[in-house]
Structure formats: C-alpha cells, structure tokens
Image: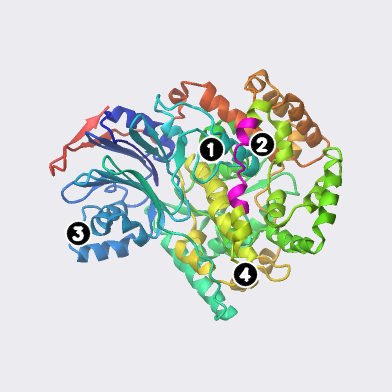
Amino acid sequence: MCGIAGLFSLHGKPVSENEVQSMCDAMAHRGPDDEGYFAAPEIVLGMRRLSIIDIDGGHQPVHNEDKSVWVVFNGEIYNFKMLRSLLERHGHRFSTDTDTEVIVHLYEQYGESCVDRMRGMFAFAVWDDRRKTLLLARDRLGIKPLFYTMVDGRLAFGSELKVLLQLPELERRLNWSSVNHLFSAMCTPASESIIEGVHKLRPGHILTASARNGVQIRQYWDVEFDPDYGKTEQYFIERLRDLLEESVRLRLIADVPVGAFLSGGIDSSSVVATMARLSSGPVKTFSIGFTDDDYDELKYARQVARAFGTEHHELVLDPNVLNVIDDLAWSLDEPFGDSSAIPTYMVSKLAAEHVTVVLSGDGGDELFAGYDRYLKERKERRLAAIPAPVRHAVGFAGSLMPEGMKGRNFLRHLAFDGADRYLDANILFREFEKASLFEPDAYKEIRQEDPRSLWRLFLGSSKMHWLSSLQYMDIKGYLPNDILTKVDRMSMAHSIEARVPLLDHKLVEFAATIPPELKLKRKTTKYIFKKAMEGVLPREILYRPKRGFAIPLGRWFRGQLSSYVRDLLLSRTSLDRGLFRKSYLERLIEMNDRGRSLDLQLWTLITFELWCRRFVDESAFCRSVPSTPRGNFRARVERAHAHEAGGTAVECA
C-alpha cells in the first residue's frame, strides 16, 4: 500500500521535516500516488502512498477526532469494515472510508492490543501525543517490512533499509553476524540488517518508545503447532476449503484492478481458481517462462489459465534479463542470494502494466509441508541407526577428499547427527567453505557467531513432531527473511501490492492443527491441501513433480554471462575490499564452468558486491534514487503542538 518513515527524539535532539522527506523520497516507488507528513516538536511521521482503498479520501497521516493520535500505515487491514462497525458502536467517529483510520480508533479503544484484532498485513506507526509515546507494529507473518535504528538519541524507522541510510550520521558498517547469516542462508536474519545498528522489527512484534521508558519490544503472536487428532481427514479438507475462500474473498477488496501471479503450481493455481469462482469477470493472471525447457513451466500456467478462463499474460526470460541487475540491487535493499528474485522482479513488471494489486500463492509449502527437503529429512532420519563411530569415521574420510570430488559432501554429511545433519544439507556455504572463501581477518569477524546455533538449539530441544519443528523454523525464518522479502521488494519496485491469501493468520493457525501425518503422507507432500483441491484443479497440476521458482542461472553463468561473473567478482574493486580470497573465487567459477551447480553461491556473491557498490561506494547514492512513475503531486504536512485540535495543513515544496 505504501512506505512509512519517521524520526522520534527521545532525548531532545531536534527532528526535521526535511530529514523525513528525504527518507520518504528514497522509497518513492512504494508510494507514487501521494505523500504526507505529520510534524510535532519531538516527532515527524512520513509516508508515500500507493492508493488502493478510498483513493480520494485515504490520505495519510490519519488522525482521530481531536488530533491527539496519528498513524502512518503500510499494508491492508482486511477486516476493517467489521472493525469500523464495532468501533462506531463504541462512539468513535470516522471521517474517511479507508482501513487506515480503523487503526487510529482501535488504538484509542484498546491501546497497543489493537494489533490482536487486525486481520491483514501491516507495518504501522502510531503517535500518541497525550502520552508522548510511539508505537510500531509489524504483522504476524512478516509480510510487510519495518526497519529501525537508534541514532544519536533519536529512533528512526522506515519500510526499507535505504530509507534509514538517508541519515548522514548512520555509519555504513557491515554487521558481521548478518554477513555470516547471508552466506549461510542467502539472506540476512529476522532481527538484523546488513548494516550494524539497523534492526528489523520481528514479525508478530510491537515496539513502544517514549522518553520516560525508552524502547521496549514484545511479541504479541506466535504460531503453535498443536495437532488435533480428534478430527477426521474430511473435516480438515472442508475447513481448509472454507478458510481459503474466505481469505481470498477478503483480499479481493480494492478500488483498483486486481490480478494474480500464476506459476502453474498448486498454491498459485488454488488462489486463481478461488478468485475465478468469486470474481464477476475474468481474472488477470501473470506468468514467467524460460527458453530452457528444463526450467520452463509456462505450459502448466497456461493449462490453469484455460481451465478458469483467465486473461493471461506471460513473459519469457533469457540471459539479457540481467540488464536490469543494477535496478535489482537497488530494489532488493540488501544482498540477497535467492535468484528467484529475478523472475519475481520481471513478473511484477509485467503485472504492473495491467493491475495495481496481485494475489500470490506464497506460504503453502511452509503451511502444508511442500518442500522436498522434508521428504529428504524423513529418509535421512534412518541414518541414526548407523553407529555414531562408523558415521564419524566415514565423514572423516570424506573430509580428506579433494573439494569438488564426487561423493565428498555425501560422506561428510553422514557424520552429522539430528539438527546438524538437516542444517548441513540446507546451508549455502559450510563452515570449512567459509574459511576458504573469506580472507583471514574477515573470517575472524564472521565466525564469532554461528547463525545455525539458534536453529540447532530449537531443532534439538523441540518437543514437537520433527516435521512441525521444521515447518516452524521455516515460518519464522525462511518465509519472512527470504520469500516474503523477495515478493515485497520486487512487487513494490514496480509500485504494485502483493497480497498473500495463504498467510491469513486464521488459515495459518488452522494449518498448525492439522496432524503432520496428513501433510506428508508416504511420498506425497501437501497431502491434505491436494485432497482439498481435488475436483477444483486438474490432477496434472495437483500431482506433478515440484520444481520451485528456479531459473537456469548456472547455465547462464557458464554461457553468455561467463565474462560478466568474472569481471565483477574478480575486479580490482571487489578484491580491494579484502573480504574474499581471489583463489577461492576463481575456484568457484571454474567448478561452475565444469558443470557443478554453484549458481546460488555465485549469485549471493554477485548481489553482495553490487550492494556494496550501490550503497557503500556511492556515498551520494541518495541523489540517484530512481524516479517514481506517478510523481505529479505536492506533499502535505500536518503540524501539531501538544495535542491541539486545530492543526493546520500547509503545502511543502
């Protein structure tokens, strides 16, 4: 819906509208339709708006009746009409038809517990002028981002990292723990950014700040896996269908055109099928394909589009797509190793030519156990029957084999137990590989904290079923840090809003009650979801092998993009950073050239280097912010002193 930003002085240092306007300018792509600001002596709130609901009347910031409470908001509250009726019965008066105003009156009525009643995706800031308190909140699953930092006695927050980098006093020092996490998991962690001192508000958390009490953070929601073995399979099937329909119906509410991403997989196809049933006209669908048949899935997307009579649009990608790589680096905001960001960027660009809102199928793999790695873990759990001394001896023998030799990693893998085994199979660079990749001084910095330690602790001590523990870990880590980050940044780069019906928190909570035996049944992943969609989707869609949103990047790196990879990673600019060993970079490139699949390792290195060039080397990067596609408007600033009711709107250049 938009991007938000603000500065709050906890210790008397001035804040200015100009600072927050510069912060908002850096994310004009998130809100090309409008902007607005609220200014008081100790705080400035700002926003850029992508108009979705109440286009003419939904300007932000929004305030209550006496202008003592103000809000800036990014996201959608899908149950806002029901909440509005409830609040009106309590005597609250509304002046707009937007969901944003509901947040103001919910806060008046329930305080910080207002988040408990919201059903949607959100990141918002509420300023309570009477109490001189700022409330920041992020939705339960982490669909919408929110960064914050303390700079010289001031709390700064924003929807993207680049927003905070507009503050000249914020030093651009690497967060070594996040660097370590990046080269383990392809993304930065849930509560930290790549910049030291800049944090992310975790999903399902709120932050309160005041001069009296400082900054406090608490969790307001978590998913609890509690299988209900007293219900029948048919009950779960019928309830799942009902919740999916309800979730999609809520996400069709908009005053602008709505479409859907369609990959041809079960998740996006289920969303499209439900949209088609609920919509009065054809659903607009958007798909990406490749000239490489091993990666192209357009035939499945076309099959679904024909089955439901959608207005279908598609785009075929080739290596020339990396002409947009600099824009990708800007839009991603941080180094990011998931190469599916490329097709997500391009399908968002395609969709933006036709709609302002898209529904996506993200979340189904985490909720219903759709990843092949869950099948692999179930199979490898049998390794525990092999005596540990035997496995350790075999693993030691594997470690003596030359790197890249066939079978080496398999033998090493046999030596691990439990959580360590699972993590070893799903990590980008293993510890011995990091020791070879990083220069000694850099490796000393990153090895101070093992990013796997919290995962290992959880997996090793959890009393959940082993499958539930893996799903929980993915819902808390992989989903918000990778999947949702990718979809948010790539869609907002083209000023469209992505909605995620499968991650309605009511549906998530229900999925956590489904017994794991109904999610992973024999060799069938997502068993219960597939049963629920029988008779809705073609069987060829339901039971075809899973591919994921993969792209032929490794082949491109061996072909047309070979010189690009070498020129970038082995450049003097890159090597002079003193982070990576030239000899190991050359070895990675050579092994990929010989056919070993190292595309994700190379892509992570590429995005890290591009990020450094864009956000560290270009010290004046804020002056090169890409222009917004819909920029003809003037900013509005609301100024308030104490909680006077007569704040005046003024024009700001």
The spot of residue 579 in percent (x, y) is: 64, 26
292 is higher (above) or lower (below) than 89: above
Q: In which quarter of the view is residue 592 placed? A: top right
Q: Nearer the viewer, mark 3 or mark 4?
A: 4
Number of numbered tags placed on the structure image: 4
Name which of mark 3 and mark 4 comes first in the sequence.
3
Type of amino acid under label 3: His
Q: Which residue is mark 3?
A: 92
For label 1, the SS is helix
Residue 209 in view, yes or no: yes
Give the crowd class for mark 4: few <14, some 14-19, many >=20 residues within 10 Å.
Answer: many
Q: Residues within 10 Å of mark 1 (few under 14, many from 20)?
A: many
- Cβ–Cβ under 8 Å for marks 4 and 2: no
Q: Secondary structure at mark 3?
A: loop
Point out the stretch of residues depicted in magenta: 444-456
**Which image quadrant for residue 308?**
bottom right
| Residue at (26% x, 52% y) in the render | 104
Which residue is tagged 4? 516
Give the residue number, with chain letter if any, for mark 1: 332
Earlier along the polypeptide chain: callout 4 or callout 2? 4
Q: Is residue 420 left or right of residue 209?
A: right
Q: Give the residue type at disc 2.
A: Trp
Rendered location of residue 477, percent (x, y)? 56, 51
Q: Position of residue 293 (x, y in %)?
A: 75, 48
Secondary structure found at label 4: helix
Tell me whether the residue at label 4 lies in contact with that at label 1, contact meaning CB atoms closer than 8 angstroms.
no
Q: Nearer the viewer, residue 30 or 319?
A: 30
Magenta stretch encompasses residue 447:
yes
- Regarding residue 314, the answer to whether it shows in the image is no
